[in-house]
Image (cartoon, grey):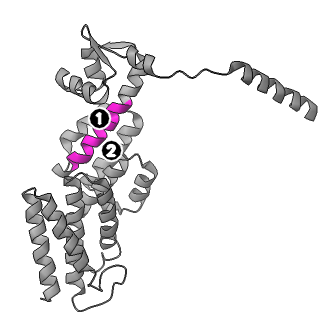
Amino acid sequence: MDPKLTEASQLLERSKAACTREDFNTSTNLLSQLKVLLTGFRSLPPLFEDTSNAVEELTIARDVFEHAVLLSVKIGDQEAFERDFFQLKPYYTDASSCLAQSPQEYMILGLNLLRLLVQNRIAEFHTELELLSPTALENACIKHAVELEQSFMEGAYNRVLSAKQNVPYKTYDYFMDLLAKTVRDEIAGCSEKAYDYLSISDACQMLLFPSENELLEYIKEEHPEWEIKNGSVVFQKAKESAPCKEIPSLQLINQTLSYARELERIV
């Protein structure tokens, strides 16, 4: 085997081992070295030169970027996920004719769809779906993301939260937790505008918390302006603290009458 390929393979194994033992700094540093080493492989995108070791180089590079994507999930770095996914994507599309399909391809494609959903990038979500093959659309990882998006758009938030119990891979938990927070923040914002107060049990049901302790922890971290009083969650303080904008009614009336006079002159 080519010495550079051997070195890349060894660095990748060391980076994966460090990630497994949760030594993420070491894993990230080794990954940076790997990416520099890959720049010497001329068979990789965008050149795609037909070298004697092209298949081996493409395979190791794909493995490197798959590892990078999964590492970014473990350390909770969405920007790194996006960068590494875009570097990985050509290996799933442009290089697919000369490489065997990766066993992690659908899992990572599903993760990317979930990321777009969490970031509320719905147009890009559907663009990515359009690029997938019919076979990919039948995969459990892709179906999971599609069903989540449908539930989210329908406002079926209980289905969104319960979907965490049926994730295809444990790796999905990171984005599912972010999505759950997005859903609860949306419900919380509507609740404090619609109600002056709710009983703790009703608030648990409304915000889809299985226990009172989880609700109280959420309020402490996310909504310290809410009050817990006599077994109820009181939103009134939050409403009072929110600035009220005065509607300039006289100004609007004068503008409307002015527009009406101008229309009469035109007619």
Circle 2 packing at 10 Å, graded few (<14), some (14-19), many (20+), is some
Q: Assign the N terminus to one quadrant of the image.
A: bottom left
Amino acid type at circle 1 is Arg
Residue 85 position within the rendered picture, expressed as x and y whole percent measured from the top left: 31, 63
Q: Earlier in the sequence, mark 2 or mark 1?
A: 2
Is residue 267 at least partly visible in the picture? no
Residue at the extreme top: 230
Residue 186 position within the rendered picture, expressed as x and y whole percent measured from the top left: 38, 32
Q: Is residue 108 left or right of residue 247?
A: left
Residue 127 position within the rendered picture, expressed as x and y whole percent measured from the top left: 44, 57
Q: Nearer the viewer, residue 86 or 227?
A: 227
* Residue bounds of the magenta highlight: 172-186
Which image quarter: residue 49? Answer: bottom left
Distance between the alpha carbons at the discs numbered 2 and 1: 9 Å
Which image quarter: residue 236? Answer: top left
Residue 71 position within the rendered picture, expressed as x and y whole percent measured from the top left: 20, 59
Residue ID at (34%, 72%):
90
For label 2, the residue is 147
Which secondary structure type mostly characterizes the magenta part of the structure? helix
Q: Nearer the viewer, residue 242 or 129?
A: 242
Amino acid type at circle 2 is Glu
Q: Is residue 266 left or right of residue 238?
A: right
Is residue 56 at least partly visible in the picture? yes
For residue 94, above or below residue 203 = below
Q: Assign the C terminus to one quadrant of the image.
A: top right
Residue ID at (37%, 17%):
235
